Structures are given as structure tokens and as C-alpha cells.
Amino acid sequence: MKKMTILLVGGGGREHAMLHAIKNSSRVDKIYAAPGNAGMADMAELVDIGVMEFDRLIAFAKEKDVDLTVCSQDDPLCAGIVDAFEAAGLKIFGTKKDAAIIEGSKAFSKNLMKKYHIPTAAYEVFTDPKEAEAYLETQKMPIVLKADGLALGKGVLICQTLEEAKAGVKEIMEDKKFGSAGNELVIEEFMTGREVSALAFVDGSHYQLMTSSQDHKRAGDGDTGLNTGGMGTFSPSPFFTEEIRERCDREIFQPTVDAMKAEGREFKGVLYFGLMLTADGPRVVEYNTRFGDPETQVVLPRMKTDIIDVFEACMAGTLDQIHLEFEDNAAVCVVLASEGYPVSYKKGFPITGLDKFDNKNYFCFHAGTKFDENGQIVTNGGRVLGVTALGKDLLEARANAYQATEWISFENKYMRHDIGKAIDEV
């Protein structure tokens, strides 16, 4: 069988973790990454094309006889990269634009859940800031404000007081802190409970759940500070029991896949379920139309099944014929960020210690790095690296991950010291 040439679109920590999984496939020969990052250069040929440059990506895929393109980033998926590639006669793994709206519009996803009785927080949608403020005066605090569109995982405000909530409406809808994402605003009840991330491969009709994980969004220890793109993760979640999984299967996972099909928006690709395990049962916090980041950095290192087989089954509608397997172990990822993230931070600092990772039990996934003019890898973002370690259980994996963070040095290095602290409460 001819080995495949793959084009991976993206250049963050998620894509670096995906690249490891693709590289481990027995079916792959050559991999290109567009644009990729400095850490991906030893496994893929980097191509200087941006993720939104569809015409250039398509031309490149044709020129290099790429067998399969893989995209798992929100902006290009919601803008229709899959539709564009398929219209050009090229194979691509990802979600079409009409289905990617499940992440691209929070108002759409909330209305979908209401229509199909999928458990979620009570909510209302607003286009007028004055109406939103009037509604807030009738609600209990704390309350959650969500910019409707894509906002790099940061368009969510948890407001403790009415004054804070009204200021949040102004910030999102009038000051446009998150740009056009704030043209519509979703206001929803504040839910309490354990959060769990559940990622699933979906082929339009069937889904296969990956191993569970839990993200840490806040910038500071003790879940303080601003929301970020994620400061660390662990997998599996001990709180996602078999009983809860079965309930999610019945009430959330399959009903969502069926709802999208019923709406004429057949979902193929990776569907991310952000769940809250409340006292009244599991509820959906949000959907994403892609691998989560940094969840991917603890999920894919534990996956045993060949990822190319899974991608192709999703595209062909034969996912029910795949036996999806994960290692009986655990993984913890600690994000090394630039001091000041997510507000303001300096870049361009040399990174040392990257040669200490074996890519079997210890991984260093690059998120914000680049080569400087001397070929040295330097910091180039707020989230710089995801240090991931495996262990026989979560306690061992966490100890290994924090030990591995000490191998890395760069000026301005910042991290949380309590990733996976919830493990101690089990």
C-alpha cells in the first residue's frame, strides 16, 4: 500500500500533538505543516502559508500530491476550509462550515440544545445592550456572559455582581473587546460542579468517544485571574464515571449528533463537549468543532489506534467499524507561558532544555515558538510550550510533568503550580 503524504494545517500545541500521532501512523510517509512552528520542524516540512489562505493551501496540496489534509482549528473550519478543499476535489479531515457553526455561534448551539432537549444552562440571547442590561436586573448572580462568535477561547465572562455584569455587557457589545464576536451576547445561568472535556470522533451518524480530560482555563493558581486558552490539563478525569458517561451517551452525545443531522448540518470531524457535572446531572457548557487545546496534548499521547484510520472512517461514515483504544495510563500537561499572558507579554527569549524529552513518556508540545535569525528556538506567544508526561496513574503523571517543567528555561517563564490538584480530592 502506498504511504500517504499529509498536510497539517495549523501551528499550535494542538497541532504539534496531532503531528506526533500522525507521525506514528504506519500509513504515513511525508508530512507538511502550514505554517507549523519551531518544534514541529524535526517531524514535518514547514510551509509558510497561513491557515486562512485557502487558495494557497489548495494550490500547495495539488502541487505536492497531498493525499489528505487535516485541519482542527476553529477559524478556518468556521470559514469553510473543508468546503473549499472538497470543491477543489481534495480530501480533507475536518468539519464543514454549515456544521462548524456549532462552535462558531453560541446562540446557534444554545438554540439547538433547547430545541432537542439537550441539557444545558438556562439562557437568553441579546443583540441590544440595553435589553441585556435590563434582563440582568431580573437575574441571580453570579452569571455568565458569552460573546456569540469565536474569541480564541476568551470571550466568556463570569460576573459576580450586577455591576460587574453590566460592565461586561459594555465590554463585549459596545467596546467590542472581542470584535464582531460580541455583536450577539448569550447570557446564561452560572452552573456549579466539576468540569470535564469529552472529545469525540464523529462521522455524521456515529460517534466514538475519546478518553476524558479536564482543562484549567484561569491564568492563576487556585483558578484565579483571567480566562486563557488553557494553562494545563489531565487525562482521564476520575469524575467522569461510567455511570455519567452512559447518561451523557443517552442525553448529550448521540442526541447532539442526531440533532445536527436533523438540521441538515451533518457533523463530521471532532466534536468537543465541554461538560459541567452538576448536582442535577451532566450539562453542556459549550461545543467546539475541533480537538481542544491543550486537551489534545494529554488525549492523543494515550491513543493506541492509528489516527489515519480514524480520520478516514469519519470521512467515509464508517466510524462504527473502528475499535478506538487508549492506553490504561494517565497524562498531565502543564503549560509554560510568558509572564503577563493573556494580557501583555514579551517575546523573543531563547529556550533551553528542549532536547531532554523522549517523545514516549515525556513530550514538549510547542505552541508559541519560532526560529530566530541564528536558528535558535525562541518564545513567540503567550502560551509557549505544553509539557506533557505520562504515568501509571494521575499522581505519577503529575509528578513527572512538574519534574519535566524544570528541564525548560526561558526568561519570563510562567506556569500554574496546581494543575490536577482536583486529583487529590478523589
Image (cartoon, grey):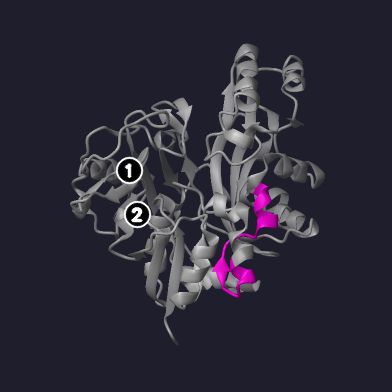
Q: State the residue at coordinates (51%, 73%).
A: 309
Q: At 58% across and 27% down in the image, what residue appears? A: 157
User: How far across and down, in percent of the image, does residue 85 sit?
Assistant: 58, 68
Q: Position of residue 45 (x, y in %)?
A: 34, 66
The residue located at (76%, 46%) in the rendering is 112
Crowd around label 2: few <14 · some 14–19 · many ≥20 (10 Å): many
Asked if labels 2 and 1 touch by Cβ distance under 8 angstroms, the answer is yes
To which residue does mark 2 refer? Answer: 37
Question: In the image shown, does 413 or 197 lie closer to the viewer?
Answer: 413
Provide the secondary structure element on which disc 1 rests.
loop
Numbered range of the magenta stretch: 85-102
Counting residues from the start of the chain, the first of labels 1 and 2 encountered is 2
Q: Amino acid at mark 1?
A: Asn
Count of number-bearing discs: 2
Query: Of the residues shown, which amino acid type is indicated by label 2?
Result: Asn
- Measure the alpha-carbon separation of dots 1 and 2: 10 Å
**Farthest residue, direction bottom:** 1
Secondary structure of the residue carrying numbered label 2: loop
Say whether residue 138 is left or right of residue 8: right
Judging by the rendered image, the residue that carries numbered circle 1 is 380
Q: Position of residue 394 (x, y in %)?
A: 38, 45
